[in-house]
Amino acid sequence: MRKAEEQDSKGRASRAVQRFLGVVEWLGNLLPHPVTLFALFALGVVFVSWIAAATGLSVEDPRPGNAGELFVARSLMSGEGIRWMSENLVTNFTGFVPLGTVLVALLGVGVAERSGLLTAAVRAMVLGAPKQLVTVVIVFAGVMSNTASEMGYVVLIPLAMAIFHSLGRHPFAGMAAAFAGVSGGYSANLLIGTVDPLLAGITQEAARLIDPSYEVHPAVNWYFMIASTFFITFAGWFVTAKIVEPRLGKYDDSEASETLEERATMSKLSGKEKRGLLFAGLSALLVTFGIVVVAGPNFGASALSWIPGWGVLRNPDPAATGPEAFRPLLRSVVTIIFIFFVVPGFVYGRVVGTVKNDRDVIDAMAGAMRSMGLYIVLVFFAAQFVAFFGYSGLGQILAVLGADALVAMNLDNPLVFVPFILMCCFVNLMLGSASAQWAVTAPIFVPMLMTIGYSPEVIQAAYRIGDSSTNVITPMMSYFGLILAVATKYKRDLGIGTMIATMLPYSVVFLLGWMALFYIWVFALGLPVGPGAPMVYEMAP
């Protein structure tokens, strides 16, 4: 009797999940292509600016010393507005900060990826792990693979399923652990990746709606990302070992859609690949040492005191201290990413034979650029949307009105980040691209939260928690279909409901734990989320 009740309860829960997922999928399918979405947003701003200007919409400038001055809506459908749009269409695009930073960083990543360095590094990390640490290493490798996210989805997730199957464990548990690290831990890493300059550029554009001189460098969330790496690794292992794997039970090979092989043994590194990794690692150490020298930190009386206490990437002003002393270094993060991937990638390729000359390096960079065609088209329309939003004055007006509403609801305190993060989680279910989401929401929420005293760097860190936590349960995530297709090799009748039900515990644990870490890190301990990243923002007079 009790068993029948339990089965009925499970059946009701399963049907409820299916209904929920059906609603999510239906809502997501209603959205047009992201490029079309941004084009519509840009046109919407033009129309709304005309209405706002016609009704005389304005708010008082809240900045100290500007009492009596107003933020006034400007129409983009006026003669002046039409002239501005026509004259600035190109410069809106070419001056959009995320465009150049991402493309330059990807030139370096393209060399490392084409040479095989990134794939070999992940395989070495996972295949060399002791059996009792396989889950931990897979989640950690997934987090680290975010430096070049496609590699994590394409290489690590299928490899994790094969490894778990070869160890007599359920391959879906391997898939879940890898997927959780790659996608759920998208905003955690020990290194700065290509997404960091992208988001920082969008944050900077949004912050300049309030403060035209504000700068946001790509490493502003680095400290919090490092702490998040260890949290995601532990949380991913815990959910896999204590929730997901016991629920999946023992795997039955008869469920597979094809004859399975022990792919894990087939993927071991060759001697040439091991030598390539060794020399690539040595070159990475040399690059790191070079960065230390040009940054010129003062090591005092330590064993490294022979390194000069100055460098070309230090602020030439001797009075500069703290983050200001390293401002040129922080502005050079994209350049450092480029060098850090090109040099080890080239060295690895030369050793294993995948890169023979300069033409191969150029082809690798060109290949990386070819893969960015859709991104460039997306950025064109996103840049117009952000620029139109700023010119119209709607960004400043919405920021002030939103900030006033938050104050009226007594949310001018750290609790404001709870609904903000949850809102980001919800938006992510509908719009899977991190850059597309942030380009839409940043011009509204960054100025709004700056107005009540929080820095753009902290706001961006909070956004990344919401964006990453629900990546593993949204069908809108661009690689969700790929993972589903690979997983059907192990279960022929696999449905989207099974996938999301498997990943839902990661989403819940990541969200709750990550929010707790955010509050402890930022508000309880008062630690910076990154180098030179303040917690508060004080509006200039």
Image (cartoon, rainbow, N blue to C red):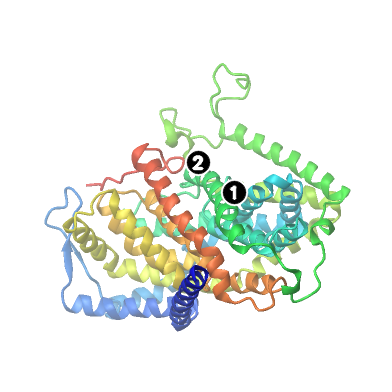
Foreground residue among 459 and 521:
521
Q: Is residue 257 above or below residue 461?
A: below
The extreme right residue here reads: 271
SS state under label 1 = helix
What is the tally of numbered marks visible in this picture?
2
Type of residue at label 2? Pro
Instruction: Out of 88 and 125, give the one closest to the viewer.
Output: 125
In this rendering, would 275 be left or right of 380? right
Residue that extends furthest to the front in the rendered view of this protein:
1
Where residue 278 appears, as percent x and y from the top left, is: 79, 42
Front residue (pair 75, 220):
220
* Label 2 with label 1: CB-CB less than 8 Å: no
Instruction: Say few, some or many: other residues with alpha carbon within 10 Å of mark 2 (under 14 / 14 to 19 / 20 or more).
Output: some
State the separation of the CA atoms marked 2 and 1.
Answer: 11 Å
Residue beneath the point at 66% across and 48% down: 137
The amino acid type, in three-letter code, at marker 1 is Thr
**What is the quadrant of residue 27 in the picture?**
bottom left
Residue 75 % position (x, y):
26, 76
Q: Is residue 450 above or below residue 71?
A: above
Classed neighbour count for the residue bearing mark 1: other residues with Cα under 10 Å, few (<14), some (14–19), many (≥20): some
Residue 77 figure quarter: bottom left
Residue 351 in the image, given as x and y percentages of width and height: 85, 49
Could you say where residue 119 lies in the image, as x and y percent from the top left? 73, 56
Q: What secondary structure is found at the residue carrying circle 2?
A: helix
Residue 524 versus residue 409 in the image, above or below: above
Judging by the rendered image, the residue that carries numbered circle 2 is: 328
Q: Quadrant of residue 399?
A: bottom left
Visible in this render: residue 347? Answer: yes
Is 300 situated left or right of 45 in this image? right
Q: Is residue 92 visible?
A: no
Residue at numbered disc 1: 335
Whichever of callouts 2 and 1 sits on the residue coming sooner in the sequence is 2
